[in-house]
Image (cartoon, grey):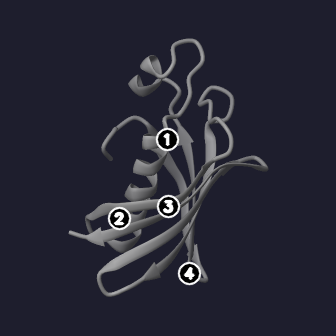
Amino acid sequence: MLIADLYKINEDIVRDGVQTTSITLNPDSDIFKGHFPGNPVTPGVCMLQIIKELTERRLGCSLFMKKASNVKFMAVINPEKTPDLVIENSFTDGDEEIKVKNIIKYDDTVALKVVVTFVKL
C-alpha cells in the first residue's frame, strides 16, 4: 500500500470476472488531516490509487496507470460518516493493456465511476 494506514481490506472476492472488495477507510489517516480539517474528504487521487492497488493484488503484478476515462465523481466520501466502501472492478485483459471498469460506492450511493487503462510493468 502506498499509504499504509489509509484503508483495510475486509473482503475481496472474484465472481464471474468481477472483483468485489469491501474496505474500511481509516478516518485518522494523515491524508484527512490536510484534506480537509474538520470536514474530511477522500481525495480522488486516493480513490484511483486504491483501484490500482486492488487491481495489482488481483493480477499479482505491478501496474502503471496509463489512462482514466469516463471519470464521474458522483458523491463525496467522508471517512467519518461513510468509511465502509465497496469497490466493483470488471476487467478486459488485452495483450498489452488491461482495461478496468470501476464503481466505488457506500450504502446505496455510487461515489465514483471510472474506466482505467493499465499496462503491466
Residue at position x 50%, y 32% in the image: 26
Contact? badges 3 and 2 (CB < 8 Å): no
Cα separation between marks 2 and 1: 19 Å
Instruction: Give the label, 1 or 4, closer to the camera.
Output: 1
Q: Earlier in the sequence, mark 4 or mark 3?
A: 4
The amino acid marked with disc number 1 is: Gly
Q: Which residue is mark 1?
A: 44
Q: Judge the density around disc 2: few (<14), some (14-19), many (≥20) Cα neighbours within 10 Å.
A: some
| x and y percentages locating residue 70 in the rendered image | 56, 60
| x and y percentages locating residue 63 in the rendered image | 29, 64
Q: How many marks?
A: 4
Q: Which residue is mark 2?
A: 56
Q: Judge the density around disc 4: few (<14), some (14-19), many (≥20) Cα neighbours within 10 Å.
A: few
Residue farthest bottom in this picture: 95
Q: Which residue is mark 3?
A: 69
Q: Earlier in the sequence, mark 3 or mark 2?
A: 2
Residue 106 marker: none
The amino acid marked with disc number 2 is: Glu
